[in-house]
Image (cartoon, helix red, strand yellow):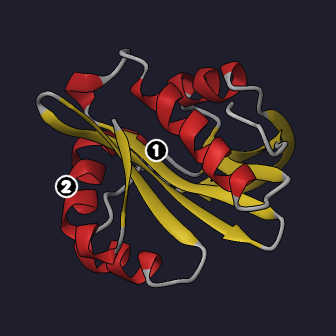
Amino acid sequence: MIAPVGPEGAGLLAALHAGGIGEAGPAWDEAAFASLLAVPGRIALVASGAEGPLGFVLLGRAVDEAEIITLAVLAGARRRGIGRALVAEAASHAAAAGATRLFLEVAEDNAAALALYDAAGFVPVGRRRGYYGRETGAVDARVLALALTPSCGA
């Protein structure tokens, strides 16, 4: 089941982010999520199973464009289609709200995420040099986009 969560769910999102982001970057805290969700056009969609919340996607929309701001799935819940379901729900939600393209940035060393977005139909549209800081040095981000239609569901 995937359901929206507002600013009141900031603590849950911070916990899911910490448990799901892993080595991909620093986890965001509750205050960061509360602030992000206070912006009009932003929504978090949380995926839950019998064992409770398993992951989420944070989506932003402005006019006719949307962006996946972050997506995290708990390490123990990966490879079960949760990320794919969250991306599809984000695309569907964005299209229903009037967005015609869905964007995201992903570290070029994140093979699992790149495979997920490729399978969902995202295509490269740009690159941000040195966007992600790592202990071993900066990593470029690939900017990906997905064309949306009113009936889209990636």
Give the residue at x 77% y 26%.
121
Q: Amino acid at mark 2?
A: Ala
Q: Residue 15 got which mark? A: 2
Which x, y percent locates residue 51? 11, 30
Q: Position of residue 118 (x, y in %)?
A: 71, 23
Please give the count of numbered marks on the rendered protein: 2
Is 2 on the left-hand or right-hand side of 104?
left
Q: Is residue 112 left or right of residue 72?
A: right
**Which residue is label 1 attached to?**
136
Q: Position of residue 92 (x, y in %)?
A: 65, 43
Q: Secondary structure at mark 2?
A: helix
Residue type marked 1:
Thr
Residue at the (49%, 65%) spot, across then down: 43
Please name whichever residue, 15 or 126, is drawn nearer the observer in this view of the structure.
Answer: 15
**133 sits left or right of 66 in the view:** left
Q: Are marks 2 and 1 in contact (CB under 8 Å)?
A: no
Q: Earlier in the sequence, mark 2 or mark 1?
A: 2
The residue located at (85%, 42%) in the rendering is 149
- Viewer-nearest of discs 2 and 1: 2
